[in-house]
Image (spheres, helix red, strand yellow):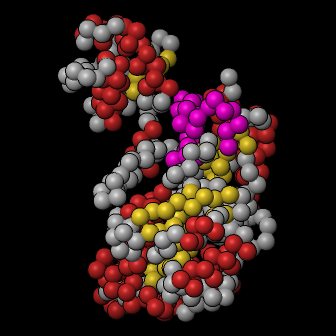
């Protein structure tokens, strides 16, 4: 049995209430690791005597930390620190002044070492990846590597890979592009960082969807740019005419094929209006095509980059979601006017991407393995989403509502109980060993979002059934 640790708390400031002081000290001890995972806490009576507190204060603080997911209480076993805490995968938004650069979100190794639980939103079906084929192509790329390949690389990336990407995008995304305009990166986040450094300057305004992929907002803020939230509805980014008469942005960032996290597709008339308006005013578009490959129902949605008059659009794509996250390969299609500037910044960042993984990926695409893998995953993910929808309707009707999405690895699940907040729902789910993200984590200015983001791609039908059953125990009183 693990020994109850000696708990040393710092002295209370005179203007701090006892309840707030004890809550802050215990939470900080957990976050700093001084109270490790699964560590028992002192009994409430002992803690109250040690620090001369009312036992009621200690009990109330323990209850609050337990509700928020920091502590676990079991009959006969006392109170212990939870095995996983909200900050592991739910970093809280931080307020920043415009002059203050954002603190980076740090994903710890512990996050990825923990067993994958329903319904982790970012996880693809890694067990379904054809690892044997990938191992063979990787070995072949290594054995056949030329001295030129081993000696160095092109800042734009391995040309055969860029040629394979251009061919793939032409047939699947309706984008006719030259390999010369493709720049290989480690994924979407590096692409956003690269474009932020290249296109943006301090004080520039960037329009971004609200809610949105918040790491994109952080990348823009890191250059001193101002993030301007534009609301999203069931048809994607909704630009009010009055918005176009204010200060013009330097760039617009959006996920038109499959909006993150709400799942909408940007309606065609809005795409065309946005393309025309931004082209007329010299505004760049950052089109994040992060998981468009996984469209398992409905008509294929062409990329904005493939539409007429899209010469000012940067298209960002990644293989880290469609294959496996540790691959660390993505790309940018850069407009001709910006290509040289993008490559200059790329050389300053890390010179060029690693050659051997690019060589293996080029073969994976050119030999048809990627297309075959995507076809299997579309069918699998569509089946798993339907399983999730069926189980939610069966066990959580009147509690959660899933919208009709047609692509992706995850879905929003809107809370129907007005008295249940996103954060409270996540904490309750965690107590029942269910992993979910609060929908309002991705809000920038909006206050009306209440719900969860639930992943379905990584979980078979049995895991989905058991996960929904556990979630129902958590949310249904």
Q: Is residue 417 above or below residue 258?
A: above
Q: In the rendered view, does 210 fall on the left or right side of 141? A: right
Residue 181 visible at all: yes
Q: Is residue 420 above or below residue 212?
A: above
Observer-nearest of 98 and 333: 98
Instruction: Give residue 236's quadrant in the image.
Output: bottom right
Q: Which residues are magenta?
A: 414-441
Residue 164 visible at all: no
- On the image, the x and y values in percent for residue 101 come to 31, 59
Observer-nearest of 62 and 279: 279
Instruction: Give residue 47's quadrant in the image.
Output: top left
- On the image, the x and y values in percent for residue 262 come to 64, 55
- On the image, the x and y values in percent for residue 453 come to 60, 47
Q: Is residue 64 above or below residue 374?
A: above
Q: Is residue 420 above or below residue 87?
A: above
Q: Residue at x 57, y 61 (%)?
A: 230
Observer-nearest of 397 and 222: 222
Q: In the rendered view, does 47 fall on the left or right side of 422? A: left
Instruction: Give residue 102's quadrant in the image.
Output: bottom left
């Amino acid at each position: 049995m693990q020994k109850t640790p000696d708990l040393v708390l710092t002295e209370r400031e005179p203007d701090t209430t006892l309840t707030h002081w004890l809550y802050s000290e215990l939470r900080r001890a957990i976050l700093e690791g001084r109270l490790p995972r699964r560590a028992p806490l002192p009994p409430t009576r002992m803690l109250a005597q040690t620090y001369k507190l009312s036992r009621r204060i200690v009990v109330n603080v323990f209850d609050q930390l337990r509700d928020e997911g920091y502590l676990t209480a079991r009959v006969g076993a006392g109170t212990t620190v939870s095995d996983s805490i909200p900050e592991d995968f739910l970093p809280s938004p931080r307020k920043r002044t415009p002059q203050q650069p954002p603190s980076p979100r740090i994903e710890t190794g512990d996050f990825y070492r923990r067993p994958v639980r329903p319904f982790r939103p970012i996880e693809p079906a890694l067990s379904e990846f054809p690892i044997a084929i990938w191992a063979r192509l990787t070995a072949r790329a290594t054995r056949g590597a030329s001295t030129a390949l081993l000696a160095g690389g092109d800042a734009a990336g391995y040309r055969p890979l860029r040629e394979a990407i251009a061919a793939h995008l032409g047939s699947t995304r309706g984008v006719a592009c030259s390999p010369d305009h493709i720049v290989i990166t480690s994924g979407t986040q590096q692409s956003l960082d690269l474009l932020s450094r290249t296109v943006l300057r301090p004080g520039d305004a960037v329009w971004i969807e609200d809610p949105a992929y918040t790491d994109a907002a952080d990348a823009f803020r890191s250059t001193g740019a101002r993030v301007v939230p534009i609301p999203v509805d069931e048809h994607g980014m909704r630009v009010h005419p009055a918005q176009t008469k204010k200060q013009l942005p330097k760039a617009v960032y959006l996920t038109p094929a499959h909006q993150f996290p709400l799942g909408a597709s940007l309606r065609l008339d809005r795409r065309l209006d946005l393309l025309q308006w931004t082209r007329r005013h010299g505004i760049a578009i950052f089109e994040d095509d992060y998981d468009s490959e996984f469209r398992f129902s409905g008509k294929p949605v062409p990329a904005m980059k493939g539409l007429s008059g899209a010469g000012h659009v940067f298209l960002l794509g990644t293989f880290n979601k469609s294959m496996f996250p540790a691959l660390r390969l993505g790309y940018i299609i850069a407009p001709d006017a910006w290509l040289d500037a993008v490559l200059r910044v790329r050389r300053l960042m890390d010179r060029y991407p690693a050659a051997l993984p690019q060589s293996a990926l080029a073969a994976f695409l050119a030999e048809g393995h990627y297309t075959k893998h995507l076809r299997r995953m579309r069918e699998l993910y569509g089946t798993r989403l339907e399983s999730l929808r069926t189980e939610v309707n069966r066990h959580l009707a009147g509690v959660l509502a899933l919208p009709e999405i047609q692509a992706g690895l995850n879905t929003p699940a809107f809370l129907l109980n007005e008295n249940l907040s996103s954060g409270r729902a996540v904490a309750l789910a965690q107590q029942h060993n269910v992993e979910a993200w609060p929908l309002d984590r991705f809000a920038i200015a909006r206050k009306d979002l209440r719900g969860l983001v639930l992943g379905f791609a990584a979980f078979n039908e049995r895991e989905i059934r058991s996960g929904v059953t556990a979630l129902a125990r958590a949310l249904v009183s």
